[in-house]
Amino acid sequence: MTAATAVEVAIRPFRFDAPQDDLVDLRRRLQATRWPDKETVKDQSQGAQLAKLQALVRYWGTDYDWRKVEARLNALPQFTTNIDGLDIHFIHIKSRHEGALPLLITHGWPGSVIELLKIIEPLTDPSAHRGSAEDAFDVVIPSLPGYGFSARPQAPGWNPDRIARAWNDLMHRLGYEQYVAQGGDWGAVITEVMGRQAPGGLRGIHVNLPAAVPPDVEAALAGIGPVPAMSEQERAVFDALRAYRMSGYAGYFVALTARPQAVGYGLTDSPVGLAAFFLWHPGFANWSYGDDPDDPKTKDEVLDDITLYWVTNTATSAGRLYWEHGGASPTSAAAIKTAEISLPVGVTVFPDDVYRPPESWARRAYRNLIYFHEVDRGGHFAAWEQPQLFSEEIRAAFHSLR
Amino acid sequence: MSPSTVDLATETAIRPFRVDVPEEQLVELRRRIDATRWPDRETVTDQSQGVQLARLVGLARYWSIGYDWRKVEAKLNALPQFVTEIDGLQLHFIHVRSRQPNALPVVITHGWPGSVLELIKTIGPLTDPGAFGGRAEDAFDVVTPSLPGYGFSGHPTESGWGPERIGSAWDVLMKRLGYMRYVAQGGDYGAVVTHAMGRQARAGLLGIHVNLPATVPLEVLPAVGGGPAPTGLSEKERAALDQVITAAMRDTAYSLMMGTKPQTIGYSLNDSPVGLAAWMLGHPGFNRWAYGSDPGQPTTDEVLDDITLYWLTSSPTSAARSYWENHGRSPLVAAAQMTADIAIPTAVTAFPGELYVAPESWARRAYPKLNYFHEAERGGHFAALEEPEIFSQELRAAFKSLR
C-alpha cells in the first residue's frame, strides 16, 4: 500500500468546536430577527405560528447553550474518513460484548446523528436496558453527505445509490465483514437501496419509514389510476395518505427537490427562517415547542438539531439530496424498487409517522419480509422519541440474522 | 344604527399618498445585505438548483453599494398615488386620467413577485396613445392597485382575501373613482383576480383581458401528472403542453410552498434580504433573466426596485398568503379558473416568453366570449415591464370593440 492510499483510507478522530464568534453571531441574528406579521388563521395551517416561534427564538437567542450537545458529541467516539472523494463523519461505538452485530444507522432530514444519540446505549449495552447481551450491536452512525460534520459535495452525483455504496465501503473499512443496516426518512431510502445493491456482507435491513405503498395505490393517489379494491385497514391508510398529500406537508419536499439552492439562501442567512422551515416537516407536526411533557423532543434537543445545521452551514447542501433523488416518493414501492430487494427486511411502523402501512402492503413490497410490527407509540423521529422501544424493535428484527 | 355622514366620508375617502421610506430602513437593509451568511455554491453549472451563488453575490454587492431606492421612490411620487379603505383594508393605487375625452377606464392588476412598479411604463402609452404611435381614441384612464398584502396596500389580518374578494374590492374602487363603465386586465395572480371579476361580472365591467390565460383543458392534466398525453393534439397544443409539463415539474415548487405554508416561508423572506431576492428570482418569469446584461429585459435596478419594495413593506409573508387564499387553483387550468363562467367579453394576448404560449384553440374552448386573441411578437411573463408599448398596443386592440 502506498502512502497516498494509506492517507485515503485513514480513519481520523474527530471533534467539533464551534467558533465562539459563530455562536455570538447566531444570538445576534436571532435577537435582530425581522418578524413578519401574524398568520391570519388560529392554527398552524399557514405554518409555524408567530407567537410560538417568537418564544422559541427568544430562548434560542438567550439561554440556549450549544456547548452542551457539543460536549456530548465530543465525548463520543467520532471520526471522519474519506470515501469516494468525500470526508464522511461518523460516530462508532463498539459494544463491550463479544459477537456484537455491527449495525449501520442512517438519519434523515431535518434530522442528524443527534436524533440517534439516545439509542446508542440500549443498542450497545442491551443488558443494562431490558435486553440481553446476545442482542448487542456495534453501532455506526454516519452523517449524510452535505449534513452535519460530513463534507458537502461540490459536484452533483451524491444520490442515494452512491451514498449506499459509500456506507458499505465504510463498514468494510471499519473491519466489519458482516453487518446490518437501519434507517428512517432518508435513512430508510438509503437502507433500502443498500438492500437492493446487496453488497457482500450485508445480512439484512430494517426501516421505520418503509416504501410500502403499492404501485396501484400510488397511481390512485396521484390521480392517474383508479382506486383499487382494498381491505378496510388498507382503505383507512389510503384515505390518510390522500389527506396528508393534500394538506401541504409535502411542499418542503417539492421545493427542495426542485430548487434547493433557492430555498437555502434564506435558511443560511436567517436562523428563524431555518427553524420555521424545519418545523414544517411532518415529524414536527404535533410538536408543542417543548411544552408537552409527553413529547420527549425537548426544546433543547430540537434546537440542538437545528443549530447543528446552522453552525455547519449545511441547510442548503442538505436540501440537495432531494434534488439528487429527483422527487420519487420515498414511500412508493415502485419508486424505491423494493421488488429488487431479496435480502431480509424488517419493518417497524410507528403510529404517528407519516403513514402506517399495513402488513399486507409490506408483504407486497418486500419479498423477504422477516419482521413486521406496528408498535403503539412513537412518530417520525422514532429513535429520538422512543429510544427504548426503538432499540427493542431493532433487536427483535435482527435477532434471526445473527 | 346607520353610520353618520362624517363616518361615511372618512370610510370612502380617497387620500393622496406618498412614499417616504425612513433612511434608517435603507441603512438597515444594506447592513443586512452586507452581513449575509452565504451557503456553499450549487453543485451544478446552471440554474437547475436555483439562483446561482455567484450571480446572487454580485447582485447583492450592487444592491448594497450602487443601488438607490430613492430613484424609484421619486418615480412613484411623481405619479398620482392614493389610498382608500375598502372592505376594512387600506388599498394603495396609482390613478392616471388621460387628457383624452372618453378614455376607457382600465384596472390593471399585477401579480407575484410583481408590483405596481412593473406597470409604470405602460401608463404613458395607455393614457396618451398619440404620443406613442397610437390613436387618441384608444386612450385609457389607468388604475393600478397594489394587491392586498402587497406593496403599499394594507396586510389583511383575517383570512378570506381570495381573488373574489379582491375582485369585488376592485369594482368598489372603480365605482368610487366615478367609473360606471370600465375594463379589467391582469397577468400572473392579476389574471386570477381578473378571472374572478369576469365571473362576478359586476355592472359596468365591460370586459377583461389577461396575459396569463387559463386555457389548459382537463384532458391533458394526466400528462402533466406524468401520464400519457391525449392523441390528436395540434403542434401548438403539443408545444403548450410540453411547456406546462416543464413548468409543473420545475417551476411550481415556489407556489406550492407559498400556497400551503405562507407563514413558514415568510419568516426567512422577511429576515434575509438575499433570501427574499433568491426566492423572488426563482419565479419562472425570471428563468431567462440575464441579470441586467440583456437590454431587452428588465434592468438590474428595475428588478431590485421590485424586490426592495417587498422588503421595505414587509410584504413577502402577506403576499405569500394570497397563494394560500387561492387554495391551489392553478392559474393555467381553465376549469380551475372556472373560465366557463365568464360571460363577458374576454381578450387574450399570448406573449412568446410566457410560462406557456396558449394556443388559440384552447383559448376558444376556455373562454365562452373570447373576442380577441393575439400572439404578440415579443415579451415574456413581465410583459408590461419588458415590452410596455407592445403591451399597450395589445390592450388598445383588445378593448377597441367595447368602447
Image (tube, rainbow, N blue to C red):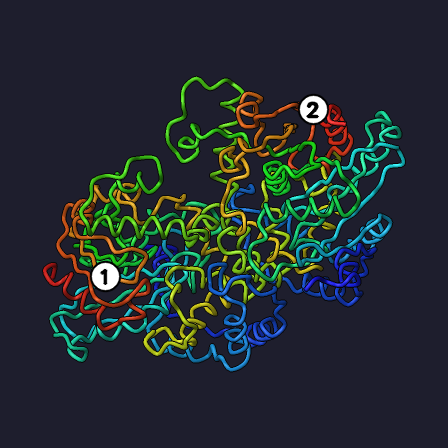
Residue shown at 77% from the left, 27% from the top? B403
Q: Residues within 10 Å of mark 2 (few under 14, many from 20)?
A: few
Above or below B102: residue A27: below
How far across and down, in percent of the image, does residue B199 sit?
59, 37
- Parent chain of label 2: B
Q: Which residue is mark 1?
A: A175
Whether residue B308 is visible: no
Q: Residue B34 or A327: which is nearer the viewer?
A: A327
- Parent chain of label 1: A
Residue shown at 56% from the left, 42% from the top? B47
Q: How many marks?
A: 2
How far across and down, in percent of the image, does residue B362 sit?
53, 24
Above or below A63: residue B187: above
Element type where label 1 sits in the image: loop
Q: Nearer the viewer, mark 2 or mark 1?
A: 2
Q: In which image quadrant can residue B27 be found?
A: bottom right
Q: CA distance from mark 2 to mark 1?
A: 67 Å
How far across and down, in percent of the image, does residue A190 sit?
31, 52
Q: In which image quadrant can residue B130 be found?
A: top right
Three-letter amino acid code at the position of disc 2: Glu
Determine which of the numbered discs, if any, sits on residue B110 in the image. none
Three-letter amino acid code at the position of disc 1: Gly
Q: Is residue B150 left or right of residue A327?
A: right
Q: Is residue A305 left or right of residue B371?
A: left
Residue shown at 30% from the left, 35% from the top? A225
Q: Residue A71 or B301: which is nearer the viewer?
A: B301
How far across and down, in percent of the image, does residue A244 sit?
36, 53
The extreme front residue here reads B1
Element type where label 2 sits in the image: loop
The extreme bottom residue here reads A63
Q: Which residue is mark 2?
A: B377
